[in-house]
Amino acid sequence: MTHDGATGAGPRIDADALQAAAVAAAPALLDAVRARIGTAGADALLVTAPANVRYLSGFSTPADGRVLVTGDGAWLLTDERYTVQAAAESWLAEQVIARDWLARVAELAAGQTLAIEAEHLTVAQRTTLERKLGSTVVPTEGLLRPLRMRKRAFEIAWLREAARITDVALTRVVDDLLRPGVRELDLALELERAMRAEGADGTSFDIIVASGPRSAMPHGVASTRRIEAGDLVTIDLGARVAGYHADMTRAFGVGRVAEPLRGWYRAVLAAQRAALLAVAPGATGVAVDGVARERLAEAGLAEYFTHSLGHGTGLEVHEGPSLSSRSTDTLEPGMVVTVEPGVYHAGQGGLRIEDLVLVTTDGHEVLSSTPKDYREFG
Ligand code: ZN
Ligand code: ZN
């Protein structure tokens, strides 16, 4: 039921070269961050959101790290558990190992107007920091979001590799295991094993395997339910590689699947393909979302598409830009987004089809390659 040694093929990417590219890109990134700090009316920024800590430093345990950026310096701050790791991984020139990191931030930023990430620093930490600084801080929200949305070449390479691993794992596991009697949980377990064996750090999120009536739940994490003939099975998964998150969904029939589910599949696939064609520089998140929603409305299914069309991925599985009716984003080359319409009908079931897509200078490139034409297994 399993493939020996998973592959033995080894990584398809040159991890050392990508790491070197990240290090080489760090000074320009810090310049861009300093420009953003200026727009916030501050001189320095304390970064505490884990994905942003990793973005700026390369530190792979960012929940236990912080980054301070001032006009002429940038530091990774962490504690004694990470002395060796921080020195090995961080591409910032200086590391500070300190339990009382708020005190060190106050020393390093003394006399400067310090911005904080209001969505991540706790109220207690802010109070302590202001007392140690002797001045008030400047709360900011989403300050680094515009930078994070536009991926640099090495980030796109990591996302491409994460998408490849996701494709390999899904194809292998459904071919081997998808049939009546298998439990959703066992599919999820094998998918995770296959992704890790192919080179993933881990999974982007808890794998969704939603079969039969459970497929009416957009986020039905794998359960002990045994798949039955006649089920539509939605599988949403992603490999995480070097901190970068892939995200893809496919739906499959097991045995003969009846109407109306087959019709829903055709409608969702048509909406997904139409929305993909709309992904290009200059397209707004509202417009691309609207394309899928209109297609589903033509099929009489608009009310069953209950979430937004897509989201950016990167160092977080959900990040900017947003493809939704409330989006304020416009697509630009280098952005990586998902396109994932779905239909969910309580009591009957549903499905979603999701690809990872790169916005290019003249349109888009779909990074997911698992076929989307309807297939039945078992
Ligand atoms: Zn997904
Ligand atoms: Zn998604």
Image: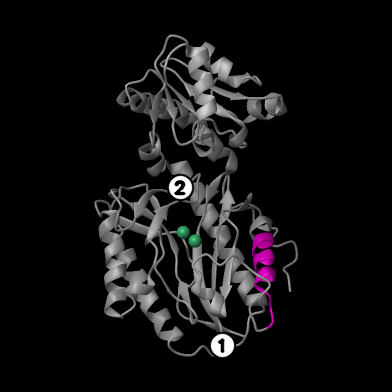
Q: At which x and y percent is residue 94?
A: 57, 19
Residue receiving disc 1: 230
Which picture quadrant has residue 45? top left
Q: Nearer the viewer, residue 191 or 121?
A: 121
Extent of the magenta region:
181-194
Residue 22 x, y percent position in the rendering: 50, 35
Q: Name the element at disc 1.
A: loop
In the rendered view, does 10 fall on the left or right side of 273? Answer: right
Q: Residue at x 65, y 72 (%)?
A: 184
Q: From the viewer's perspective, is residue 329 above or below residue 118?
A: below
Q: Residues within 10 Å of mark 1 (few under 14, many from 20)?
A: some
Q: Amino acid at mark 2?
A: Ile
- Residue drawn at 51 percent across, 88 percent down: 257
Which residue in the protein does label 2 denote?
156
Q: Is disc 2 placed on a helix, strand or loop?
A: helix
Q: Say whether mark 1 is within 8 Å of ligand 1.
A: no
The reply, left or right, for residue 37 in relation to residue 67 is left
Side of 360 relative to 370 (left or right): left
- Residue 133: image location, x then y, percent: 48, 13
Foreground residue, 119 or 70? 119
